[in-house]
Image: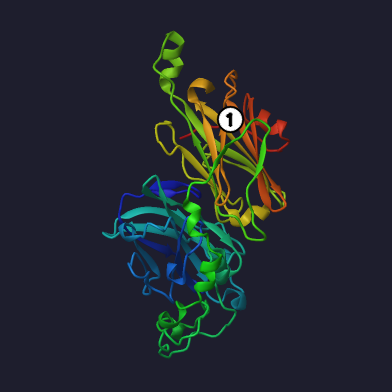
Amino acid sequence: MELRKGQKISLNDDKLIVTFERTASALDIDTSAFLLGANAKAASDDDFVFYGNTVHAPDASVMYIEDDGAIHIHLEKIPRSIERIAVTATIYDANVRKQNFGQLKNSYLKICNYNGVEVATFKLDTFTVETAIVLCEIYRYKGAWKLNATGSGFKGGLAALCQNFGIEVSDEITAPPKVEPPPKKVEPPKKIDTQRTKSSRKTSTSTSSTSSSSSRKKTSTPKDVSTPPKKIELKKGQKVNLIKKGDSPIGDIVINLNWEQPSQPRGFFDSLFGSKGIDLDLCCLYELKDGEIGAVQALGNLFGNLYFPPYIELDGDDRTGNNAAGETMRINGQHVKDIRRVLIYTFIYEGAANWEEARGVVTVTCPGSPQLIVRMDDYGSKLHTCAVALLENVGGALSVEKVVQFFRDSKEMDDAFDWGLNWTVGRKD
């Protein structure tokens, strides 16, 4: 299967081999993998697998193979605390050598199972000045594993990737020394050194995974945030601010849509329309601080990206309404400062506009804040698009306002909120 950027597929194989394929070039490319928790961060340096830490400890669920730079992943062994695995590629010493991925042609990502059978490929030839790429993300979704063909590139190399995923890096340019490390009980904390020379690649394992994780734990999400917070059901026009303590970033904001299917057909028109069920889609319009605007929705495969602009990602598309988990969208709490406003909306892709029978409910969950409940309870409307809630940046935090306003289509809603996108008619595959 040849994937498009942003396309997501289910993974049926438990053991995978991910490789970055390219024609011969002067670029010295390294692959790596970041094992991330629910907050999209690595909990410790052990969750960063690369040429300096080739095996994820203690389960060996992810391995870096030096011979070909492949990433081997055993999904069954992945700890439950890990929600995502970001597989990346960087150019060694790119700034000094004045190199970038725009100089590499005919490159692609290849995913195979352990029997060597090709699962999927993904072309990677749209880059210019980037020196680091998130090639793909392997993530949990409703109890199963899926793969997202990410293909997002940016400047900064391996150090920038580490910082983005919560790994502390040093500013030193020297390679790790070829000496045995002192006993752990007297060894001072070290920071990950992302620099290396060709001769140090094999010896760097012993010195690069001992960075100071104690300071990171002090700033990570408190253990008690998993306790279900108090719930607040918003009234139309009511605003509630998501809690932000001091200058600390808030955790990921999780937005969930759930709805019910209509009851059994009661008449001729119900049999024509109601029996098809309702396909209700969770979507959003976004506006970033730098002026970028756009939409995140299943229609058109605009699933977004959690780690790069727009810092919003839709997990999937439930076309039945029968899944208890509904549809979920995430906003990266680390990048709330980069977001000006987000309009959460939904539309009925299939089925009659019967909002009373659908009984759609949107919940907004953020660590440390009460869970907000927004019901689409204006049951008189027969229009297909509903603007549900407006999130706006207020002093670096987000306020949430219940809107529940209905429109004929997305364009009419766009005009009402003065967003400025161009809309065309689309269909799902």
Q: Nearer the viewer, residue 22 or 29?
A: 29
Tell me which colouring the rendered structure shows: rainbow
Residue 137 image point, x, y percent: 45, 56
Left or right, residue 341 beside residue 160: right
Q: Nearer the viewer, residue 107 or 188?
A: 188
Hey, what amino acid is under mark 1?
Answer: Val
The residue drawn where x is 51% and y is 54% is 225
Q: Which residue is mark 1?
A: 425
| Label 1: which secondary element | loop
| Residue 426 visible at all | yes
Q: Residue furthest bottom?
A: 179
Residue 356 image point, x, y percent: 52, 21
Residue 326 sits in quarter = top left
- Say above or below: 339 vs 319: below
The residue drawn where x is 49% and y is 66% is 89
Left or right, residue 6 beside residue 60: right
Residue 103 sits in quarter = bottom right
The residue drawn where x is 26% and y is 59% is 115
Q: Nearer the viewer, residue 75 or 30?
A: 75
Q: Residue furthest front?
A: 230
Residue 173 image point, x, y percent: 57, 83
Q: Nearer the viewer, residue 269 or 373?
A: 373
Count the labels in the image. 1
